[in-house]
Amino acid sequence: MKPDLRNLTRPELAAALAALGEKPSHSEAVFKAVHKRGAADLAALPGVVERVRKALVPAFSLSPRAAAERTQVSRDGTKKMLLRFSDGAPAECVVLPAKDRLAACLSSQSGCSCGCTFCATGALGLRRSLAPSEIVDQFEACLKEAGTLNSLVFMGMGEPFLNWENVKKAVLILSDSRGRHFPQAKMTLSTIGVIPVIEELTASDLKVRLAVSVVAADEEQRARLAPMEKVYPIKKVVAAVREYCRVRKALVMFEYILFCGVNDRPEDSALLARLIGDIPCRVNLIPYNPPGGPGGEFPRVKAFQLELIAAGVRTYLRQERGADIAAACGQLAAGK
C-alpha cells in the first residue's frame, strides 16, 4: 500500500520529493494544495507543476477527507460529530462554544486502552490509533461546522501520548504556515501521565500546552479509578510535570474529576494541594459525567474548590457542556 501524502509533515514531504529527484522546495505548493485547498486527486493538485504531480502519483496515495457521518447538537450549542474512517473505525470530535471563543475537542484514538473505570471511551477498549490525517480530518469537520476555531484540545477519545508520533505529526501539520497555520500555543494536549512523552515534550520546541489528569491524589484510590496509575504512578508523573514547568517556564493544567463521596473529602483536597502546590498550575475541577447521562455539581464541589484556593492553588470549575448528547468529558463512545 502506498503511503498517504496527507500523513506527511512538510519536511517529510520535502525529503520525499528529493528522493523522487524533485526539488524539495516544491513541498510548499504540494502541502498547501493538500492541507489548505483540500485536494483529493494527486493528478490534479492545484498550484503544483505537472512534472511534480506525475512523480508523486506512482509513489503516494491521497485519501479523501473523512466527513461527519452524524452531527448532534446540544441544548447549550455544543456540537458532536461522528467520523468513520475507511476501515470502519469510528471517532468523535466536539465543537465547544463559550462566551468569547470556540474550541474543538479532538480524538487521538478510536477507543482507548487506559481502562479508566469512569470513562465511556475506556469501556470500548482500543480499536486502533488514528493516523495524522484522521486527526486533521476532525479539525476540518469542526472548522466546517463552527466556521472559526480559537483553540484545540486533544481531550476526546483515546490517550494522545500513547499515539504520540501521530499526534505530534498532526500538531505539526495543523500549525504549518503553508496549511491551516493554527497556533501551537492554542493547542492543549491532555494525558493520564505518560511520563516518557512528558519528558520528550519538556525537551522539545513544541509550543503546545500540557494538561494532566490527576483523577485522585491518593495512589490506591487512583489505581482503582485509573489503572494506568500502576504504570505511571501519580507521584512520578507530578515529578515529570514539575521538571517540565521548570525547564519550559510554563504553566500546566491539572484536571481533577470529582466523584461524590469518593475523592471529594477535605482530606482529598488537602492531599491534592500538597501534591501539586509547588507547581505553577491551574486546576480544573470536573464533576463526574456518567456515561449514560448528565452529571453536574453536587454539594462538595464548590467547597472542594474553595479548599484548594485557600491552600494557594488556582482552581476553576469546568462548565459542563454537551451532556445531553453524551459529549461531555468521559462520555464519548463513538455513537454507542
Image: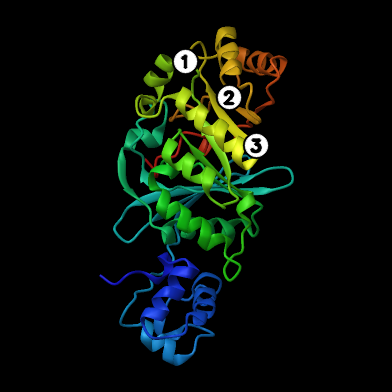
Q: Mark 3 or 2, which is nearer the eye?
A: 3
**What is the tally of numbered marks visible in this picture?**
3
The residue shown at (66%, 17%) is 308
Residue bearing the label numbered 3: 251
Q: Are marks 3 and 2 in contact (CB under 8 Å)?
A: no
Where is residue 289 shown, x and y percent of the image?
50, 28
Q: Mark 1 or 2, which is nearer the eye?
A: 1
Answer above or below: position of 188 versus 294. Answer: below
Kindly indicate the quadrant of the structure image that contains residue 335: top left
Residue bearing the label numbered 1: 218
Q: Amino acid at mark 1?
A: Asp
Which residue is more in the foreground, 128 or 119? Answer: 128
Instruction: Evaluate whether residue 194 shows in this view.
Output: no
Q: Amino acid at mark 3?
A: Leu
The residue shown at (37%, 19%) is 224
Q: Are marks 1 and 2 in contact (CB under 8 Å)?
A: no
Neighbour tally class for label 2: few under 14, some 14-19, many 20 plus, Cα within 10 Å: some
Please name the colour scheme applied to the rendered image: rainbow
Cα–Cα gap, marks 3 and 2: 27 Å
Cα–Cα gap, marks 1 and 2: 23 Å
Answer above or below: position of 50 versus 147. Answer: below
Residue bearing the label numbered 2: 296
Q: Secondary structure at mark 3?
A: loop
Q: Secondary structure at mark 2?
A: loop
Where is residue 55 shown, x and y percent of the image?
37, 86
Neighbour tally class for label 3: few under 14, some 14-19, many 20 plus, Cα within 10 Å: some
Answer above or below: position of 31 versus 245. Answer: below
Q: Amino acid at mark 2?
A: Gly
